[in-house]
Image (tube, rainbow, N blue to C red):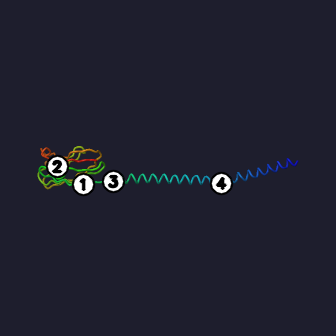
Amino acid sequence: MNKNLIVGLVVVVLVVLGVAFFSTNKTEAPGDEVGTSTEGTMMGDKEDGAMMDDKEKMMGEGEMMASVKEFTVEARSFKFSVSEMRVKSGDTVRVVFKNAEGFHDWKLDEFGVKTKQLQAGQEETVEFKVDKTGTFEYYCSVGQHRANGMKGRLIVE
Ligand SMILES: [Cu+2]
C-alpha cells in the first residue's frame, strides 16, 4: 500500500512537474520565436545595408566613369589646334569645333561622329560616348585636307 502510495505520489509529482515544464516551455516558445524573428530582421537589415553599400559603390564608380571631357578644336588650313585627346572608356567626349580659316569639318569614323562642313567663323559642337579603348584618328574630310595634315588622335584608355 505504501509503495503504491509513493508511486502514486511520484506519478502525481511527475505529472505536475511535466505540466509545469510543458506550460513553461509553451510560454517560452513565443519568446524564442520573437528572438528568432528579431535575428532574422537584423540579418535582413544587414543584407539591405550591404546591398546599399554596393549600390553606393556602383553609383560612385558610375559617377567617376561618366565624366565629360571637353576639347575645343580650332581648324586652320591645314591643321587642327588639338592633335591628341586622351580620355577614359565610358567618358563622354565633347568637341567644340571652331573653324577659324578655310572650309573644314571634324570627323571620327569609329564613333560615327562628324560636324557639318563649316565656313570660316562657324562652329559646331558634337558629343559622343566612348565605349571602346584604342587609338582612333579624327580628321577633316574636305578635299585632301587629311593628307595635308588635318588629323589627330583620340586615345581611349
Ligand atoms: Cu579641312
Rendered location of residue 80, percent (x, y): 16, 51
Earlier in the chain: of badge 1 and badge 3, it is: 3
Q: Which mark is residue 105?
A: 2
For disc 3, the neighbor class at 10 Å (few under 14, some 14 to 19, many from 20) is few
- How far apart are the two marked residues, 2 and 1, measured between alpha carbons? 17 Å
Query: On the image, which quarter does residue 109 sit in?
Result: top left
Amino acid type, callout 4: Glu
134, above or below 100, in the image? above
Residue that numbered label 3 is attached to: 64
Secondary structure at badge 3 equals: helix
Which of 83/109 is in front?
83
Q: Is mark 4 within 8 Å of ligand 1?
A: no
- How far apart are the two marked residues, 1 and 3, measured between alpha carbons? 15 Å
Q: Which mark is residue 28?
A: 4
Secondary structure at badge 1 equals: strand
Amino acid type, callout 1: Glu
Q: Is mark 2 within 8 Å of ligand 1?
A: yes
In the current view of this chain or complex, which residue is farthest to the bottom?
121
Secondary structure at badge 2 equals: loop
Please tell me whether mark 2 or mark 1 is closer to you in this view.
1
Rendered location of residue 45, percent (x, y): 50, 54
Earlier in the chain: of badge 2 and badge 1, it is: 1
Q: Which mark is residue 70?
A: 1
Q: Who's the residue at 83% across and 49% down the image? A: 6
Amino acid type, callout 2: Asp
Secondary structure at badge 4 equals: helix
